[in-house]
Image (tube, rainbow, N blue to C red):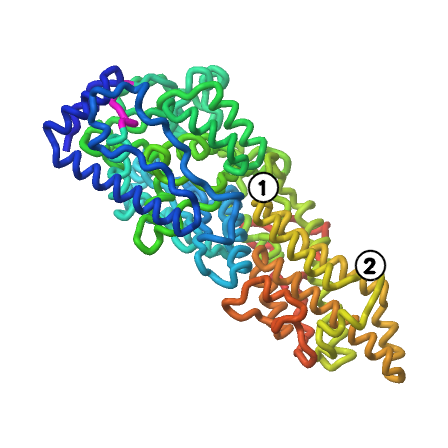
């Protein structure tokens, strides 16, 4: 149904217009009121279940229809509740990636963000003892103009083209070993049918109005730049280098300016909301400089590209701006009775190029419709390729085929480990350099966890017929070596990993496992079990000493494998399987690592020598090629 009061422009009093709308269309106002009230009730119920404070109930539609209230006397916007800290084990854990332009080909940028989400949710499942109330969302953004133009160029329809390319993203993500709970597509009815209803809520709150926009349009990125930003970029796209287009067109505006103060207050009160800190400072600086209202629609014309997408409610001649459409996916994907308790997201991962949309426009949209805000918006840096920024013009994107070549040559888990531990998770960019990959592979994997598990497994096989000779708990008491208090070392590693994850520091969460491996290597160098073994046949005390040494090593490596498993699920599962200590479903990490618990290694546990996890790489070998011609199978 058309809403005439919105079409009159920004200079007309909202209260009088709502009065007129209520007089003409009372049923619609009542329906919107019921929808808004029900949505807010769901939010309050979810917040109560999670232990978050109940937000002040905003005025109903009926109370908004009051021309006697000036804008100066209306209730102030109140910041919705958020999670305390980046991640909380006391409620559902919901992690998202951006949804990716379906017109792109999957490359390292898409895969890195999604890999981080995959590792984070695997870590969370490990902590909780299974899937539990965890949810990992990714997907594709399919309503861009370029989908239509590309489809026409390939003699296809927009939907068929989107179907084809979305399948490529699914294939790429499966090749990287990702485990999303859902893959949402914005062309799906479950999403596109909900977007207009959410915008209706914004209209009902007086946060959307009709106007005319003039600005500098970046066709390649499908976004407008402000006059200042366009001038700073010399009126060319900062991304593609192509000239910006000066456009004037009718559109619907979102009152972003209305939310400047509550957004600023929220970021100041919740420093964990935007991370890393440099990104938070950047966002706060721009908010303090003032926010302008932003267009959220594009006109529908005879151009087929403008006819693809979601229509504005009540105005079939306008379609929802692709970015607004896309941002709502995080909500539409869980807007079901079963999934509603997942809201809000615990952490939303994205690259630094889309920080503004996610750290400013997205929370403002949520404030408008009365939804609680995410716990953390984490904006990581970019990958470089051998020291150069990746771009289409240079043709140096590291595509999925190149990543698959590395996975074939060194193993998928080795690739995942390198990307996660050496990637641009902080404010700075990171360089994908083959020599650095080989260095990290040899240091952390071939000479680290791989060599250490091989040494310990071989010694248990050689000296004790492949059976753990003594309980791990007894071994920790029997072998007292200065500097190697194994119960404290293991407990400390688990505590550090858990604390780092709660602070959204994934690299910090993975580091303690490597420290445990290095501690085992150091312990072996100090205790020299191969020398003790020579005396063990004729000396029961030496045999007991040898048993304690190897049991301590094996137990520490078991815990290290658990802590490394979010990054390397296949290889660490191999270790746990060969050492007869696969954790049972439902057991949380705190129980799995207890030395006096039922999951610690016991005397008689079969410890297989197993295959080599990671064969040392030759630094002189050339990088693997996407064609796979020079690749050899990974061990």
The answer to whether marks 1 and 2 mark residues whose Cβ atoms lie closer than 8 Å is no
The residue singled out by tag 2 in the image is 483
The residue singled out by tag 1 in the image is 425
Question: How many numbered badges does the structure rendering display?
Answer: 2
Look at the image and tell me whether residue 244 can be seen: yes
Which range is magenta?
206-212
Does residue 618 sit above or below 540 in this rendering?
A: above
Which residue is more in the foreground, 146 or 350?
Answer: 350
Which residue is more in the foreground, 271 or 428?
Answer: 271
Across and down, in percent, residue 278 comes to 58, 31
Give me the residue at 68% from left, 54% from top. 512
- Answer with the quarter of the image where residue 32 lies: top left
Give me the residue at 69% from left, 62% from top. 450
Give me the residue at 23% from left, 28% from top. 64
Does residue 565 sit above or below 198 in this rendering?
A: below
Give me the residue at 49% from left, 34% from top. 392
- Answer with the quarter of the image where residue 319 lies: top left
Disc with the residue nearer the chain's start (1 vs 2): 1
Looking at the rendered structure, the secondary structure element under dot 1 is loop
């Amino acid at each position: 149904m058309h809403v005439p009061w919105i079409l009159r422009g920004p200079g007309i009093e909202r209260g009088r217009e709502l009065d007129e709308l209520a007089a003409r269309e009372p049923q619609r106002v009542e329906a919107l009121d019921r929808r808004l009230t029900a949505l807010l009730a769901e939010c309050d119920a979810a917040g109560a279940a999670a232990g978050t404070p109940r937000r002040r109930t905003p005025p109903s539609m009926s109370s908004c229809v009051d021309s006697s209230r000036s804008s100066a006397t209306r209730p102030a916007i109140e910041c919705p509740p958020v999670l305390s800290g980046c991640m909380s084990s006391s409620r559902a854990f919901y992690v998202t990636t951006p949804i990716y332009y379906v017109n792109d080909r999957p490359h390292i940028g898409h895969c890195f963000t999604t890999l981080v989400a995959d590792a984070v949710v695997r870590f969370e499942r490990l902590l909780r003892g299974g899937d539990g109330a965890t949810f990992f969302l990714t997907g594709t953004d399919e309503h861009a103009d370029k989908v239509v133009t590309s489809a026409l160029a390939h003699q296809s329809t927009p939907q068929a083209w989107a179907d084809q390319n979305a399948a490529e993203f699914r294939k790429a993500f499966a090749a990287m070993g990702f485990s999303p709970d859902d893959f949402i597509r914005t062309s799906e009815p479950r999403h596109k049918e909900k977007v207009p209803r959410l915008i209706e809520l914004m209209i009902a709150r007086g946060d959307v109005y009709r106007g005319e926009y003039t600005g500098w349009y970046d066709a390649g990125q499908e976004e407008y730049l402000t006059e200042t930003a366009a001038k700073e970029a010399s009126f060319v796209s900062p991304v593609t280098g192509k000239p910006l287009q000066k456009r004037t067109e009718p559109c619907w505006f979102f009152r972003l300016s209305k939310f400047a103060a509550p957004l600023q207050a929220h970021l100041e009160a919740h420093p964990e909301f935007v991370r890393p800190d440099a990104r938070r400072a950047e966002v706060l600086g721009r908010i303090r400089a003032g926010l302008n209202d932003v267009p959220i629609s594009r006109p529908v014309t005879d151009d087929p590209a403008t006819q693809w997408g979601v229509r504005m409610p009540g105005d079939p001649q306008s379609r929802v701006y692709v970015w607004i459409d896309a941002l709502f996916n995080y909500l539409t994907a869980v807007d079901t009775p079963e999934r509603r308790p997942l809201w809000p997201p615990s952490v939303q991962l994205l690259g630094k190029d889309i920080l503004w949309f996610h750290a400013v426009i997205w929370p403002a949209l949520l404030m408008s419709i009365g939804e609680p805000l995410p716990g953390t918006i984490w904006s990581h840096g970019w990958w470089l390729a051998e020291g150069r920024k990746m771009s289409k013009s240079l043709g140096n994107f590291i595509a999925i085929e190149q990543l698959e070549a590395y996975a074939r040559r060194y193993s998928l888990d080795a690739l995942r480990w390198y990307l996660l531990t050496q990637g641009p998770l902080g404010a700075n960019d990171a360089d994908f350099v083959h020599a650095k990959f080989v260095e990290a592979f040899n240091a952390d994997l071939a000479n680290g966890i791989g060599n250490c598990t091989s040494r310990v497994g071989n010694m248990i096989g050689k000296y004790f017929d492949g059976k753990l000779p003594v309980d791990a708990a007894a071994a920790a008491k029997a072998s007292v070596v200065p500097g190697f208090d194994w119960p404290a070392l293991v407990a400390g590693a688990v505590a550090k990993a858990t604390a780092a994850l709660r602070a959204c520091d994934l690299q910090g969460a993975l580091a303690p496992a490597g420290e445990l491996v290095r501690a085992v290597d150091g312990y072996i160098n100090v205790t020299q079990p191969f020398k003790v073994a020579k005396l063990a046949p004729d000396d029961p005390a030496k045999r007991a000493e040898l048993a304690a040494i190897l049991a301590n090593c094996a137990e520490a490596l078991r815990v290290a494998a658990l802590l490394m498993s979010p990054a390397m699920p296949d290889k660490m599962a191999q270790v746990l399987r060969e050492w007869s200590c696969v954790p049972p479903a439902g057991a949380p990490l705190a129980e799995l690592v207890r030395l006096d618990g039922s999951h610690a290694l016991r005397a008689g546990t079969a410890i297989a020598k197993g295959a080599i996890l990671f064969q040392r790489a030759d630094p002189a070998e050339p990088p693997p090629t996407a064609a796979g011609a020079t690749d050899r199978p990974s061990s």
